[in-house]
Amino acid sequence: MKLLFKIALSVLTLLVVLYWSSFFILPAITIVNYSGATIAQAEIDLPNSHLDFGAISNGASNTLHYSLAQQQNGVYNYTFITAKSVANHGSCGYVTNNEINKRVVISVHKDNRVTCN
């Protein structure tokens, strides 16, 4: 019985470590809203995936992780729609395959200016 408990505890610990390490390994995009208004809908298109951030309040941020496997190289194509239904489209940055721990921060400022770091 003790051996079964040790095996179960070891497997559980391994699963928890793998889960948390995936957040370190997977690339992520963070959108920060400094626009002075709520972003009603924020979306980013990658070559092989679509990320929907939902609504982001003024002064808030949201982070999503995406897959390492990107079959094509490309850019981050963003669409931000404000609460007043004003759309802001554009692109920034560059996406390639297997970018381990890549972090991109897209900031939305007043007058619909967008910066990418």
Image (cartoon, helix red, strand yellow):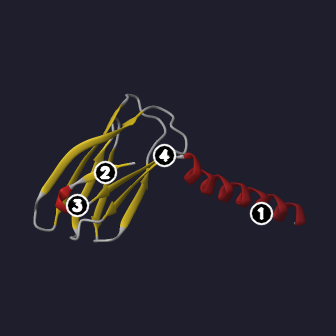
Q: Which mark is residue 9?
A: 1
Residue depicted at x 38% and y 62%: 62
Question: Tag 4 or tag 1, which sits nearer the N-term?
Answer: 1
Q: Secondary structure at mark 3?
A: strand
Q: Amino acid type of disc 1?
A: Leu
Decide: few, some or many residues near mark 1? Use Cα within 10 Å; few <14, some 14-19, many ≥20. Answer: few
Q: Which mark is residue 27?
A: 4
Q: Amino acid type of disc 4?
A: Pro
Question: Tag 1 or tag 3, which sits nearer the N-term?
Answer: 1
Which of the two marks, 2 or 3, is nearer to us in this view? Answer: 2
Which residue position holds label 3? 41
Q: Quadrant of residue 48?
A: top left
Q: Point out residue 38 in the picture as x, y percentages from the top left corner.
A: 22, 70
Q: Is residue 45 above or below residue 32?
A: above
Q: Secondary structure at mark 1?
A: helix
* CA–CA distance in space, label 3 to label 1: 42 Å
Q: Point out residue 50 in the picture as x, y percentages from the top left corner.
A: 31, 46
Question: Tag 3 or tag 4, which sits nearer the N-term?
Answer: 4
Q: Which mark is residue 115?
A: 2
Which of the two marks, 1 or 4, is nearer to us in this view? Answer: 4
Residue depicted at x 47% and y 35%: 69
